[in-house]
């Protein structure tokens, strides 16, 4: 049987393809290997940070967790070296690890300063600063959404430990963050889904705030008056989550009034 | 109970719907001094206010970034759809081929293909810079695959050979600005396009057989077999190998269809030829030959 037309050049091309795909496969494996390392560092960080729920003093917790940032940055330097060979191609293979890394950094930053870790600051911390190897804005935003999931639990435990000003601070922060996220035109994707979940965190925090306030536990001024706290709490209530969960809350309100009127 | 004396005021505040009214009620209900002091603890501190403004400014940037990216993605998707649509037209044009009009049909197909390159592929080239090439791959990949299919089909009908990726990319070079790195079709899209090509070649082969061009069908058969053989080696190495796996199965189906058609001609063709009494092979297998 005669050889197929242009068999030689055809064979050559596919031979090239094969070695090309082989190389990319290797690259991918190397990227995955670093991503796994990154994941284990962020998990370590997370386990340290979880101590804040056990009312360990924040500075102490931060010190141990912060020590890992250097390790994390080294891993990203290593990753940069590999990714340089194929900018952008295997982004999906280190995406979710990076989102978690942002979550950890942002949570630490918030515990320390009470402010949001901005995209540029996160880039700086991870050393993801070049256009070929930068922190994707969407990844950053997803990471921030994950951080918001951590806050309701933090508030609950702080209040239990006796910090009654915490709900107000967290509520203020989360309200601002939620408002900021609403400025974004999101597509129907993962980020949108995570953002949609954020309002439940906000609601939970507001509930805690309300509970604390209505009992006059929140930072009460000199000669503090529990009457005032009830009034203000209810006003605040009306204006914030009442809009979002109006049906749910109006039912709750009726029940609550009944309790007050017929104790 | 602690809150019993507050029932009245609490209810008032609940029933009030407008903020002004709330203020008014609060003022009458409470001593002004006490209220003012209380409000102090709910107003944010200076640091908090500053953090909020910072956050807002940063998010305005993110919003801008996301808007730009979404618009770009939308433009890329549109370009990709236009490429798909017009490449399909080129493929249909190639299928209009017959023994008599080969040159004319292929000439038009090539002209149309050049149009696709100039009008639509060029739009992709303009959009995809740097990492966009990979980030937006899902948005443009279907169009590029279809384009590869059309270009390789044209080329095969004309020369009987496979259009190499390098040759194909050479056509795209002039579209790029010389200052930036030129857009090149990547190996993955090229291979995925080739996988689709076999489906079109199968249709072409069946058409040629029914038109009596047995040699052409024979040639297609060999060509497709060879491509299938080469791709079996590459398929598992590809990133989105699931996609490729289904394509490989379809490809095998196509190859077997061509082989079966060639087999039919081979076995039964010898019976028909003497019956028709024609030496040039211009007989039809599918229609019963008319008797003179």
Image (spheres, coloured by chain):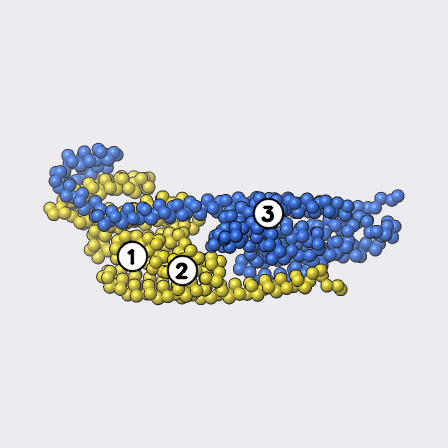
Q: Which residue is mark 3?
A: B117
- Relative to A151, is B22 above or below? above
Residue at the far left: name it: A223
Q: Which residue is mark 1?
A: A109
Residue A260: give x, y in percent of width and height: 21, 41
The colour assigned to chain B within the rendered structure: blue
- Relative to B218, is B74 above or below? above
The colour assigned to chain A within the rendered structure: yellow
Q: Is residue A217 left or right of residue B140?
A: left
Secondary element under disc 1, as helix, strand or loop, is helix
Q: Is residue B282 left or right of residue A154?
A: right
Secondary element under disc 2, as helix, strand or loop, is helix
Number of other residues with Cα within 10 Å of mark 1, as a class: few under 14, some 14 to 19, many 20 or more: some
Judge by depth and name the residue closer to the eye, A63 or A76: A76
Judge by depth and name the residue closer to the eye, B134 or A42: B134
Q: Marks 1/3: CA distance?
A: 50 Å
Specify whether disc 2 shares its chain with disc 1.
yes
What label sits on residue A97 in the rendered view?
2
Residue A96 shows in this picture: no
Q: Marks 2/3: CA distance?
A: 39 Å
Disc 3 chain ID: B
Residue B174: give x, y in percent of width and height: 57, 50
């Amino acid at each position: 049987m005669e050889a197929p037309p242009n068999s030689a050049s055809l064979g050559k091309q596919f031979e090239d393809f094969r070695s090309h795909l082989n190389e990319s496969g290797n690259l991918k494996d190397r990227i995955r290997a670093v991503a796994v390392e990154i994941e284990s560092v962020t998990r370590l960080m997370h386990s340290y940070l979880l101590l804040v729920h056990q009312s360990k003093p924040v500075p102490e917790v931060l010190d141990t967790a912060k020590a890992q940032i250097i390790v994390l940055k080294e891993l990203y330097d290593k990753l940069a070296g590999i990714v340089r060979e194929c900018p952008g191609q295997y982004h999906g293979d280190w995406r979710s690890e990076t989102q978690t890394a942002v979550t950890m950094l942002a949570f630490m930053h918030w515990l320390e300063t009470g402010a949001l870790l901005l995209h540029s600051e996160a880039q700086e911390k991870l050393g993801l600063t070049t256009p070929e190897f930068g922190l994707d804005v969407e990844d950053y935003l997803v990471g921030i959404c994950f951080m918001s999931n951590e806050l309701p639990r933090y508030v609950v435990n702080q209040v239990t430990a006796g910090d009654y000003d915490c709900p107000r601070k967290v509520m203020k922060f989360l309200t601002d963050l939620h408002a900021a996220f609403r400025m974004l035109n999101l597509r129907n994707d993962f980020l949108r889904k995570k953002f949609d979940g954020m309002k439940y965190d906000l609601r939970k925090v507001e509930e805690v705030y309300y509970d604390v306030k209505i009992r006059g536990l929140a930072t009460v001024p000199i000669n503090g008056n529990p009457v005032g706290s009830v009034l203000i709490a209810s006003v605040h209530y009306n204006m914030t989550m009442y809009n979002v969960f109006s049906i749910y809350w109006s039912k709750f309100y009726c029940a609550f009034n009944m309790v007050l009127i017929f104790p | 109970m602690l809150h019993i004396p507050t029932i009245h005021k609490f209810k008032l505040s609940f029933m009030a719907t407008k903020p002004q009214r709330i203020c008014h009620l609060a003022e009458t209900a409470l001593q002004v001094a006490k209220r003012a002091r209380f409000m102090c603890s709910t107003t944010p501190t200076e640091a908090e206010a500053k953090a909020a403004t910072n956050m807002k400014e940063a998010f305005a940037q993110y919003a801008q970034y996301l808007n730009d990216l979404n618009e770009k993605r939308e433009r890329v998707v549109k370009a990709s759809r236009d490429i798909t649509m017009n490449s399909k037209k080129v493929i249909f044009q190639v299928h209009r081929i017959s023994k008599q009009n080969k040159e004319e049909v292929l000439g038009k197909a090539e002209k149309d293909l050049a149009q696709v390159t100039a009008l639509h592929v060029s739009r992709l080239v303009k959009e995809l810079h740097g990492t966009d090439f990979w980030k937006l791959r899902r948005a443009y990949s279907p169009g590029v695959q279809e384009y590869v299919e059309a270009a390789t089909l044209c080329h095969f009908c004309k020369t009987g050979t496979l259009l190499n990726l390098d040759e194909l990319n050479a056509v795209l070079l002039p579209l790029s600005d010389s200052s930036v790195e030129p857009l090149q079709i990547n190996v993955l899209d090229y291979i995925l396009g080739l996988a689709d090509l076999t489906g079109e070649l199968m249709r072409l082969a069946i058409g040629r057989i029914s038109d009596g061009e047995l040699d052409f069908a024979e040639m297609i058969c060999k060509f497709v077999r060879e491509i299938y053989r080469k791709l079996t080696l590459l398929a598992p190495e590809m990133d989105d190998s699931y996609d490729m796996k289904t394509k490989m199965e379809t490809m095998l189906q196509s190859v077997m269809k061509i082989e079966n058609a060639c087999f039919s001609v081979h076995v039964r063709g010898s019976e028909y030829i003497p019956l028709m009494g024609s030496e040039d092979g211009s007989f039809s297998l599918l229609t019963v030959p008319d008797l003179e």
